[in-house]
Image (cartoon, rainbow, N blue to C red):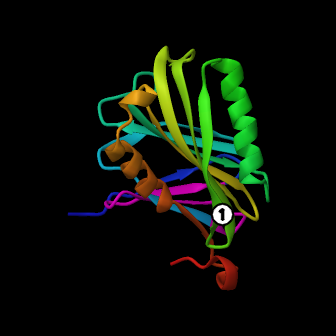
Amino acid sequence: MSNALAVIRKPGWGLTLLVTLLLTCVVHAQDNSENIYFDLPPGFEEGFEDGDESFFIQEWVPKGETVNDWSQMLTLTVQDVANLNPVEFFNHMADGWEEACPEYGGMLLHEGRENNYPVAVWFLRCPNNPMTNKPEFTYVKGISGNESFYTVQLAYALQADEVDDSIVNQSMVFLKQVTICDDSRPQTHACH
């Protein structure tokens, strides 16, 4: 059995995404030294990718679903903004959700440092997302790198009262393993 390897180069930045048989993702901007690592949830496949020199987005959905009709979606964004405060980003994102969805709710769940990078984790919910006409409950992790700002979002097409402990726990375990590292700064941001 051979390892499946997909190499995707983002125009402008030359971002490379590696997906191995273990479904471990690595995104590396070739003109900088930071990497984001995470394991894809089982059964997810790429549904969308786009980007330019200042912004990159990639979305995955369960096999057989699309980014236009999904029950769960995983989204990675990389913005060419260094040292952005993750809580300020959350507040800005929450303002956008409130504007698009007046019944939205959201809460900051965690603020701290991981591998010496500022991070925040929050959730947002919208009973009826106007873009999808579905409910959406989303967990987001924001990481402020020295060269970029990263978000990883795990969204569910569920009402808040449908989100049970197993979904909460699964989401927190997933987001906890999302990490940024920088081999050029091993004393402060080591890659393990």
Q: Among all residues in the image, which is located at the extreme left?
A: 1
Q: Is residue 161 above or below residue 180?
A: above
Q: Which residue is mark 1?
A: 112
Residue 100 on image: x %, y %: 66, 19
Residue 83 located left or right of residue 48: right
Residue 26 on image: x %, y %: 51, 61
Q: Is residue 18 magenta?
A: yes
Q: Amino acid at mark 1?
A: Gly
- Asked if residue 53 shows in the view, the reply is no
Q: Is residue 165 magenta?
A: no
Q: Residue at x 72, y 63 (%)?
A: 31
Q: Which residues are magenta?
A: 14-34
Residue 167 located left or right of residue 93: left
Q: Quadrant of the N terminus?
A: bottom left
Q: Residue at x 66, y 46 (%)?
A: 11
Q: Among all residues in the image, which is located at the extreme bottom?
A: 187
